[in-house]
């Protein structure tokens, strides 16, 4: 690709043609501050934080959208620019409730950080009216606080463009502009799918998950309760970021140690249930292929995707696998199999899950998720909430030793751990389905065609003389594109994996927030997924059907995959919903 030569702050810089000033400056090691900009999602040049001076230009230009030209001379830090950015921040703060001390984002708020960098003082605020908004807590998973919204529109763009949903947008005009849903509906009344991608990109404390950490502390303190925790694969790939570890650090051992020190009665692993999911899902797929069932079968692990399918593709709910998600399978087995084995009344068990996902908070309240007559999972928290809980409990995370999960529900294979990356469920299912169909051991366990962070992936495998066609989509905008192809008869897959969040759970709406400065120039999904693939490689057992504790579960309790008992406890049903924007 052709390179363009320019000067930034007097320095000779060369950057690929088509780059923006922001990108060229980044290549030269110069950070230009941004607030509204999110690469490929929100490129509107609206907040004016990234303004720079260009020699010969009459006005300041927005570096995030302005392309570079040969011979251009750019200045990023002149007194005029610093004054302009400071004024922008002062104006934002003049209509902001500034409760930093109690704000969930204090410490990693992009607005707070910029105010600090630019020396914006308390007394700097412009006098004027302030808007006051009621909190919107109508959704199961999150709270919207417009008093802290800076109208950057990142949430609007991710909901509309990345997820193809569009249940939030700017309402009113001028000073009265606010982000909300149509007709002032609460978010919980719309067809929001609870994915939390809006929370993940919000630079301030305007959007946050409903925090259930207090309920966990109370449950652990109650001597009548038996409190068990499970942690999803992606949590170990993200949690370390909250404690200063570089992105891509696997903190599985420290996480298990922290949970034990908090006082959970058992520290188990959702990966165990991921292996169980594969046993049920692969059996269901083979049954549908052999017996003329509805195809393509589509995975059901992602509750954001499930709710999306119910709202936006209700005519395809029969394509969904009837398997509960690993979180719910875990809860179901905890309150039936484990409770019976240990002689514990399931009503006394508090089933806690730690998930990279906000939609899990919605999922635990769905119908048909109560194998023992009580909810399979009682409390679902995000990776971010777990970090808060660890800090609140005074646990010195970085100093902890590496510890193992408890057994039996802590034993997992490499197939279980890759569930957190897009393509991981497909790869895990293929490892089991191919060996089941051929009766032979796979020479190579890695199905690389379905790996990687592309939004849509397709592959075909010849298995026992049959061409098995598969597809993988992550992010709901990509899911929509793929399903429209299926509906138009342009593709005929046997099996599709869909994850609600782009890149899969490693990039879930409950994972540690990454500032725009970092995410615009970092492959967050790829780096976190790398943790899971390395974890898989290091495992002695890498196929779900070889997990000894899952084999024991079938021998002792379920019978066989797809048995009557398995269906009663591990499978679920769906509803057809309407779209309400
Ligand atoms: S959003 Fe940021 S600036 Fe506003 S109160 Fe919270 S931490 Fe402070
Ligand atoms: S949770 Fe997802 S669907 Fe709901 S408003 Fe946010 S981005 Fe949109
Ligand atoms: S809610 Fe957050 S992401 Fe959305 S416009 Fe307001 S500050 Fe930006």
Image (cartoon, rainbow, N blue to C red):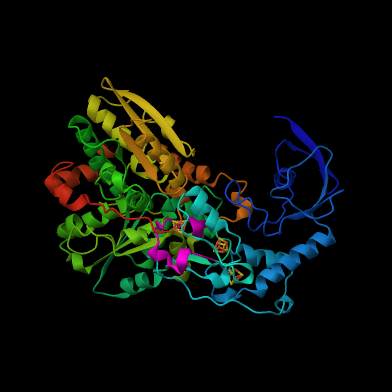
Quadrant assignment, res 59: bottom right
> x, y (%) of residue 539?
37, 39
Viewer-proximal residue among 296 and 213: 296
Q: Is residue 443 magenta?
A: no
Quadrant assignment, res 2: top right
> x, y (%) of residue 348?
21, 69
Residue 80 seen: yes
Instruction: Judge whether 130 appears above or below 142 on screen.
Output: below
The magenta span reads 179-201
- Residue at point 54%, 70% (across, down): 146
Q: Is residue 180 magenta?
A: yes
> x, y (%) of residue 109?
59, 64
Left or right of 96, for residue 471: left
Quadrant assignment, res 468: top left
Viewer-proximal residue among 54 and 452: 54
- Residue at point 26%, 74% (across, down): 223
Left or right of 403, for residue 322: left
- Residue at point 15%, 59% (across, down): 340
Quarter that holds the C terminus: bottom left
Instruction: Judge whether 101 appears above or below 569 on screen.
Output: below
Instruction: Judge whether 180 appears above or below 574 on screen.
Output: below
| Ligand 1 occupies quarter | bottom right
Question: Most extreme residue toward the top, as rendered?
Answer: 465
Give the total of numbered labels: 0
> x, y (%) of residue 377?
28, 61
Residue 535 seen: no
- Residue at point 74%, 69% (across, down): 119
Viewer-proximal residue among 252 and 532: 532
Quarter that holds the N terminus: top right
């Amino acid at each position: 690709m052709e390179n363009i030569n320019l000067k930034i702050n007097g320095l000779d810089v060369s950057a690929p043609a088509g780059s923006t000033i922001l990108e060229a400056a980044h290549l030269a090691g110069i950070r230009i501050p941004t607030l509204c900009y999110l690469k490929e999602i929100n490129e509107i040049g609206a907040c004016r934080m990234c303004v720079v001076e260009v020699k010969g230009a009459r006005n300041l230009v927005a570096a995030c959208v302005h392309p570079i030209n040969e011979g251009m001379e750019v200045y990023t830090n002149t007194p005029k620019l610093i004054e302009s950015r400071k004024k922008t921040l002062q104006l934002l703060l003049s209509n902001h409730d500034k409760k930093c001390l109690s704000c969930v984002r204090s410490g990693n708020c992009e607005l707070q950080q910029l105010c600090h960098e630019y020396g914006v003082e308390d007394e700097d605020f412009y006098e004027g009216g302030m808007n006051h908004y009621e909190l919107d807590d109508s959704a199961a998973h999150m709270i919207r606080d417009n008093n802290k919204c800076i109208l950057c529109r990142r949430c609007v763009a991710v909901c509309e463009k990345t997820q193809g949903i569009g249940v939030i947008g700017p309402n009113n005009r001028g000073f009265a502009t606010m982000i909300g849903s149509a007709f002032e509906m609460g978010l919980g009344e719309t067809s929001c799918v609870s994915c939390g991608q809006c929370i993940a990109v919000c630079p301030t404390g305007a959007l946050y998950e409903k925090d259930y950490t207090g309920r966990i502390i109370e449950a652990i303190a109650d001597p009548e309760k038996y409190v068990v925790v499970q942690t999803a694969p992606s949590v170990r790939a993200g949690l370390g970021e909250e404690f200063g570890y570089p992105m891509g650090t696997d903190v599985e051992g420290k996480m298990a140690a922290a949970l034990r020190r908090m006082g959970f009665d058992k520290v188990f692993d959702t990966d165990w249930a991921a292996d169980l999911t594969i046993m049920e899902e692969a059996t269901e797929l083979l049954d549908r292929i052999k017996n003329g069932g509805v195809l393509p079968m589509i995975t059901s692990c992602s509750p954001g995707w499930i709710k999306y399918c119910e709202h936006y593709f209700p005519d395809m709910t029969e394509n969904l696998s009837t398997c509960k998600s690993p979180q719910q399978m875990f809860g179901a087995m905890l309150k039936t199999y484990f409770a019976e084995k240990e002689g514990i009344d399931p009503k006394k068990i508090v089933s806690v899950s730690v998930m990279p996902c906000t939609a899990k908070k919605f999922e635990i309240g769905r119908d048909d998720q109560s194998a023992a007559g009580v909810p399979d999972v009682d409390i679902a928290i995000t990776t971010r909430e777990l970090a808060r809980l660890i800090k609140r409990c005074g646990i010195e995370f970085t100093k902890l030793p590496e510890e193992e999960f408890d057994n039996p529900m802590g034993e997992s294979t490499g197939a279980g751990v890759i569930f957190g990356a897009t393509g991981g469920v497909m790869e895990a299912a293929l490892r089991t389905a191919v060996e089941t169909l051929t009766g032979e051991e796979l020479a190579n366990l890695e199905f690389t065609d379905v790996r990687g962070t592309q939004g849509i992936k397709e592959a075909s495998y010849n298995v026992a003389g049959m061409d098995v066609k598969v597809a993988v989509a992550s992010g709901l905008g990509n899911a929509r594109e793929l399903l429209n192809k299926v509906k138009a008869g342009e593709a005929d897959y046997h099996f599709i994996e869909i994850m609600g969040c782009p890149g899969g759970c490693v990039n879930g709406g409950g994972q540690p927030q990454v500032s725009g400065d970092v995410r615009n120039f970092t492959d967050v999904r790829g780096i976190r997924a790398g943790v899971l693939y390395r974890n898989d490689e290091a495992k002695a057992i890498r196929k779900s059907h070889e997990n000894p504790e899952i084999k024991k579960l079938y021998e002792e309790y379920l019978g066989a995959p797809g048995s009557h008992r398995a269906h009663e406890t591990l499978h679920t049903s769906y509803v057809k919903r309407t779209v309400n924007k």
